[in-house]
């Protein structure tokens, strides 16, 4: 009889351990789902100072981009990125604003046929520029004025990016471009 009670107690202990492991697994899964529901913020907020490094270093120490520029994070393998670069080529005048094209891999000829405006191309192979700007996806565009993020756009909305550059609301810029 004692052997049965001992076996029953061991079974109950084993069952309790399994239940505890399952409960712990469920708790971890719920925490992961909650984190997925709140992804990292997309880009530096408007008004935030832009990080001087590492981009200034990659530009050979030239910090003039901090005054006024368009910093575009794009990948040639990303179709929306290619659409944005092609659209900007149609609507951006060469002297309108300095453009810095930050690419995740090595800078090669992959944008060559689409890039019809002067741009300084920067290779961000280790992701330090992307992390500094908190650009978690491409295309991601930042308008920089006086060392701060004046505006930002996540996605390939060409009219919105052109409106950012011109300082007009997107609706007005779209009407002006269609006339």
Image (cartoon, rainbow, N blue to C red):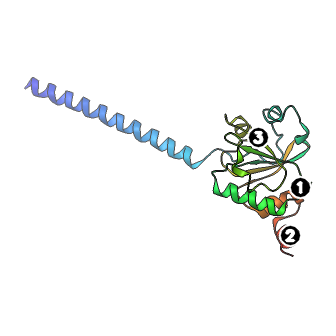
Which residue appears at 74% of the width and 44% of the height? 102
Q: Which residue is mark 2?
A: 172
Q: As drawn, is 54 to the left or to the right of 79?
A: right
Look at the numbered disc 2 and give the secondary structure of its residue.
helix
Q: Which circle's residue, 1 or 2, is located before the other in the chain?
A: 1
| Quadrant of residue 132 within the rendered picture | top right
How many numbered marks have been drawn onto this rendered protein structure?
3
Q: Which circle's residue, 1 or 3, is located before the other in the chain?
A: 1
Which residue appears at 13% of the width and 27% of the height? 5
Look at the numbered disc 3 and give the secondary structure of its residue.
strand
Which image quarter is the N terminus in? top left
Q: Residues within 10 Å of mark 2 (few under 14, many from 20)?
A: few
Q: Which residue is mark 1?
A: 94
In the rendered image, residue 21, in percent from the top left (x then y), is placed at: 35, 34
Q: Residues within 10 Å of mark 3 (few under 14, many from 20)?
A: some
Q: CA distance from mark 1 to mark 2?
A: 21 Å
Q: Mark 3 and mark 1 in contact (Cβ < 8 Å)?
A: no
Foreground: 75 or 169? 75
In the rendered image, residue 28, in percent from the top left (x then y), is placed at: 46, 38
Q: Residues within 10 Å of mark 1 (few under 14, many from 20)?
A: few
Residue at far left of view:
1
Q: Which mark is residue 122?
A: 3
Which residue appears at 82% of the width and 42% of the height? 48
């Amino acid at each position: 009889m004692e052997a049965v009670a001992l076996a029953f107690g061991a079974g109950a202990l084993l069952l309790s351990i399994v239940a505890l492991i399952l409960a712990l697994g469920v708790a971890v899964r719920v925490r992961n789902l909650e984190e997925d529901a709140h992804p990292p913020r997309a880009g530096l907020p408007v008004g935030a100072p832009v990080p001087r490094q590492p981009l200034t270093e990659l530009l050979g120490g030239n910090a003039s981009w901090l005054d006024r520029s368009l910093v575009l994070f794009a990948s040639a393998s990303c179709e929306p990125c290619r659409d944005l670069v092609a659209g900007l080529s149609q609507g951006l005048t060469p002297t309108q604003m300095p453009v810095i094209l930050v690419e995740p891999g090595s800078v090669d000829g992959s944008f060559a046929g689409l890039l019809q405006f002067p741009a300084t191309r920067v290779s961000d192979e280790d992701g330090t520029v992307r992390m500094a700007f908190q650009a978690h996806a491409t295309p991601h565009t930042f308008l920089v004025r006086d060392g701060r993020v004046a505006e930002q756009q996540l996605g390939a909305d060409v009219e919105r990016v052109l409106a950012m550059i011109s300082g007009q609301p997107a609706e007005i810029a779209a009407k002006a471009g269609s006339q």
